[in-house]
Amino acid sequence: MAALGWLTPRRRSATARSVLAGEAAAEAARKTSLQLEQEREAEAAALEAAKAAETAPEEVEFPVVGDVRAAAFFDLDNTVMQGAAIFHFSRGLYKRKFFQRRELARFAWAQIWFRLAGVEDPAHMQEARDSALSIVKGHRVSELMSIGEEIYDEYMADRIWPGTRALAQAHLDAGQKVWLVTAAPVETATIIARRLGLTGALGTVAESVDGVYTGKLVGELLHGPAKAEAVRALAAAEGLDLARCAAYSDSHNDIPMLSLVGHPYAINPDTKLRRHARDRDWRLRDYRTGRKAAKIGIPAAAGLGAVAGGTAAAVALHRRRR
């Protein structure tokens, strides 16, 4: 009996420990079962996501169709057109005996610098445009507009980047307005915008009196920060939400304009803009070599339909700001 008495507490103690062990095992089993269930659900969700990714389009739908408070703003030189529009225009004027060969050489130097350096050098572009102002002085605006139509066909039409043109068309197809924003003369920019079926253009305004150029500018060149101010003013006049707008440029000089909008794009970017765009996770696209950067948000839609759009609003806006 003494031996049995000695064993009884041990049996009770062992039983208590067994109960504790059993309860612990049951709790662990419950937790493990829950964990396994969660893992199976996660695997199933991942599988569904993978299947969806295989059938989904590679790019997010943009621009948003029907968003009338959104618009697109495109730089011209080396973004929409290869080279500088002012130089191509000057070639046409030279052909028509508006000035001498030595003056064309000045334009050619600015163009060569532009093509080799891949950027708009303000000093060179300023010199070229100062020369242009002296050349058009005394000529009628209507005369230069008529000649500009011919010059577009001769020197500019074949220099439009098809990829950038398709980007602009994507915005037009979505029902959005598309504007050129350039330091080129507003008359030249307006011709290009009309021929491409765009809405209109913001450009440098040359002073005219009674329809005749005076050889002076209204304000300054539409370059750098001035472009951003023009976009901001136009957005206010048109009731646009800049956070929903897009802007496209090749030059770091246009960072102020690109920074205004919610969807900035670097097109054929110079070194500084490429670095800036990558640092800020902006989308990139380069048509000069055919390579396409990883972050692209708009499919290259083919073709360009004619879209009725006036340029009077842009010109009128500039005239109001005189």
Image (cartoon, grey):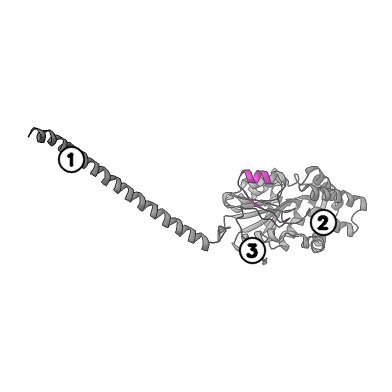
Res. 150 image quadrant: bottom right
Sequence-wise, which precedes: disc 2 or disc 1? 1
Q: Could you tell me which residue is drawn at 63 percent across and 58 percent down?
A: 177
Write down the residue under mark 3. Answer: 301
Closer to us: 277 or 204: 277
| Disc 2 to disc 1, C-alpha distance | 100 Å
Does dot 2 land on a helix, a strand or a loop?
helix
Left or right for 195, reference 56: right
Q: Which badge, 3 or 2, comes first in the chain's sequence?
A: 2
Amino acid at the residue labelled 1? Thr
Q: Earlier in the sequence, mark 3 or mark 1?
A: 1
In the rendered image, residue 209, in percent from the top left (x then y), is placed at 80, 51
The stretch in magenta equals 274-293
Q: Nearer the viewer, mark 3 or mark 1?
A: 1
| Amino acid identity at mark 2 | Phe
> Which quarter of the rendering shows the N terminus?
top left
Asked whether the residues under the numbered discs 3 and 1 touch, taking CB atoms below 8 Å apart as contact, a structural biologist would say: no
Left or right, 236 with respect to 107, comes to left
Q: Residue at x 79, y 47 (%)?
A: 117
Residue occupied by mark 2? 89
Q: Kindly tell me whether residue 85 is visible in this rendering.
A: yes
Q: Secondary structure at mark 1?
A: helix
Is disc 3 placed on a helix, strand or loop? loop
Determine contact: label 3, label 2, CB under 8 Å: no
**What residue type is disc 3 on?**
Ala
Is residue 57 placed above or below 73 in the rendered structure?
below
Q: CA distance from mark 3 to mark 2?
A: 29 Å
